[in-house]
Amino acid sequence: MKLKSKWKIKEQAVFISKLGELLSHGYPLADALHFLEFQESKKKAADFTKAIQDLRNGYPLHQVLTHLYFHPQLVSYIFYGEQYGDLDRALKEGGRYWKKRTEDMEKVKKLMVYPLFLMFFISIVFYILQSVLLPEFQTIFFTMDVDQNIFLKILSASSFILPVIPFILLGLLLFMYVLKRFWFNGLCPLRQRRILMSIPISGTFIKLYETYFFASQLSGLLSGGLSINESIKLFSKNQQQPFYQKLCSIIKDDLTEGRSLEMIFRELPYFDANLPVVAANGQKYGRLDAELLHYSRFLLERIEERMNAILKTIQPLMFSLIGLLIVSIYLAVLLPMFSLLEGI
């Protein structure tokens, strides 16, 4: 059973960014950890003690952070950085990306809190309308022998549906949990990733991120002096990421058979469509590491641009929906009154 870290994702990202900065200024790893220990809360003192002890016992940094239950993706940045000898760059890059990601998610949550509260309040108003006002209007319409307007008929019909919606949502969440626990988690990692990438919007982000991460780390390994075969073999040994273990085992076998990177990437559905072109150009001109590095930076910018576009779209949509609900409440009260006045 996976244990939870004392560190939130954003705290992990900030921590490894600071660690990367200290390493780039010449601090030894143990001294950098000692320096950062004073900046953290006392409840994390045991983690620093354990980390320094693990370093003294000869564990590499990625294993030290694994023992502290840091996020596997963050640990992977460090794992590859240790292999290509540029640990401070890997720490700063991984920390920067995950800090930005958590900040974006926090913005989404803040954007959703107020509209969700309003929707909850409006749902209560609708419930009062249906349970108190609607029966009174129906009685008056029946007594005065006046036909109900279409809006009142729709509101009456919805009174049978709205009370059931919370139970439907709860059942859907329970079904998704059971499906993930007993079916999805048992699938091959490659099959899991194909399913996730087929989800609208989030699937696009997953594909862009996986391409960015793979291109960035492969560039670092190549620039560190490893060959393509050695780099892919190293990817297949990363136990933190079963997806890359399986995928790079396939790539390694294809390379052994003499196939080019361009051809292999073109047949894989897990990466951006431009990766084969970048690989072909890089191998053609003998600068594959530089091409992959520039391409990974371009992908990172695309991810940030798309995330910003989504953030700018969510708020107007949410408030438009709330405005529609508020107008519906006014109509639910006023239209029956107008109908009664016309029938008198």
Image: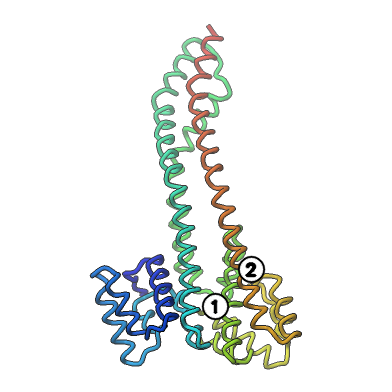
Few, some or many residues within 10 Å of mark 1 (<14, 14–19, 20+): some
Q: Position of residue 62 (x, y in %)?
A: 42, 83
The amino acid at mark 2 is Phe
Nearest-to-viewer mark from 1 and 2 = 2
Q: Which residue is mark 1?
A: 243
Residue 28 visible somewhere in the drawing:
yes
Give the residue pinned by disc 2: 298
In-front residue for pair 126/294 = 294
Q: Amino acid at mark 1?
A: Phe
Residue 232 vertical position relative to residue 209 in the rendered view, above or below: below
Q: Tell which of 150 and 101 is nearer to you.
A: 101
Residue 29 is drawn in which quadrant? bottom left
Query: Residue 219 is drawn in which quadrant?
Result: bottom right
Q: Position of residue 21 (x, y in %)?
A: 43, 76
> Residue 100: x percent and y percent?
49, 63
Above-or-below relation of 3 to 233? above
